Structure formats: C-alpha cells, structure tokens
Image: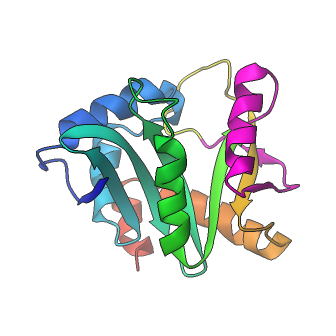
Amino acid sequence: MQIIRISDIHHPRFGEVWHLYQNSFPLCEQRTLDHQITAFKADRFHLDVYLDGETLVGFIGYWDFDDYLYIEHYAINSDLRGDGWGSRILEALQKTAGKTIILEIDEVVDEISTRRLRFYQRLGFVVNPYIHPLHRYRDIETEHQNARLVIMTYPGTIDPQTYERFNRDLGEIVMKRDEQLQTNTK
C-alpha cells in the first residue's frame, strides 16, 4: 500500500479522489470545491490517499491539532469494500498519529449504522457520551439537518474539556471558509 499526500486540486490524482468523495457522503456533509481549496490552505489539514499499485483504495482527510487528530472524511473505493482495506488504512494512521484520534459517525439507528459502529469498535475506537450536532457544509434542507452524531475516539474516551475544544475547533477552523480560515491556521 502506497500513501500519497495531496495538497491542492491540481494534483494528478485529485479528480479521482474528488469523485470518490462526492459519491461517499451526503451533499450536506461535502465541502464545495472552493471550500476544499480553502482547506488545502490550512497547515493543519491533510489529505492522504492510499493506493494499491495504481488503484485508488481510499483516502483520509484529517486535521492535525496539538493533542488530537480529527478525521473529517474517510472513504474506501466501493469496488474494494469488504477486503480489509478500511481496517489497514485506519490501523496505519493509528500507529503514526501519536495522539488521540477523533471521528464522528451517524447515530446508531439501523443495520448500516450498527455495522459502522462495530467496525470502529473493532479497531479500538470508543463511544463518547457527548451529544454532538451535525455541522453542515452546505446550507441545504435535508432529512438529516437536525441529526446528532456519535463521537468516537481512539485509544480511549476524551474528557469534557477536550470535547469542548474539539467542538470549538470544528466550528472555528474546520468549517470556516477562505476569508475566515486564514486567521485560524497554525
């Protein structure tokens, strides 16, 4: 497995990754292309792409804060799901992170969300008790607009102060647009 880091939309693999991104998340959970360009300007943002030979396996878009990593988006090529790639990619990140990893999943309400929860639990992620709203990237009406997310962390739970800092970082840094982000980077 090869890992490459994409740092702008002009990278030769970006189009393929962007296509996977657009097909993996609901529209309200997707950045616009302009908002993605803004994220690339932040020193804290990383987009790591995983390849098997020339085949795109998947990607992780994450933010590297002082004492935690926040996985913003994570997707596996639909043709390769079920082959263990998702676990291998997350395990590789867990080995190199050196700090707490935070991610969000949908509330557990059906078989799909239950499988997603169990997948992360098998990798050592734990559920935290915080009620966390969905932060929408786009102001569009959706059936999920009042959704609450489950906060999962590795290797253990986070204290309320860390959660509050994460939630603040999410609103003030991760979700900001170009003119706002410039004052909030490292």
- Is 64 displayed left or right of 105 in the figure? left
Task: Name the residue: 66% across, 47% down.
Answer: 104
The answer to whether residue 146 is visible is: no
Q: Residue 24 placed where, x, y %? A: 46, 28
Nearest to the observer: residue 14 or residue 154:
154
For the record, the magenta segment spans: 106-135
Task: Name the residue: 31% across, 50% down.
Answer: 49
Q: Does residue 57 sit above or below 96 in this rendering? A: above
Nearest to the observer: residue 54 or residue 65:
54
The answer to whether residue 91 is visible is: yes
Nearest to the observer: residue 113 or residue 181:
113
Nearest to the observer: residue 85 or residue 128:
85
Q: Residue 152 placed where, x, y %? A: 73, 54
Q: Is residue 156 magenta?
A: no
Task: Name the quadrant of the C terminus.
Answer: bottom left
Q: Residue 169 placed where, x, y %? A: 59, 66
Task: Name the residue: 49% across, 63% down.
Answer: 93
Q: Does residue 177 sit above or below 180 in this rendering? A: above
For residue 145, which quarter of the picture?
top right
Q: Residue 143 placed where, x, y %? A: 67, 18
Q: Is residue 125 magenta?
A: yes
For residue 172, which quarter of the picture?
bottom right
- Is 78 displayed left or right of 90 in the figure? left
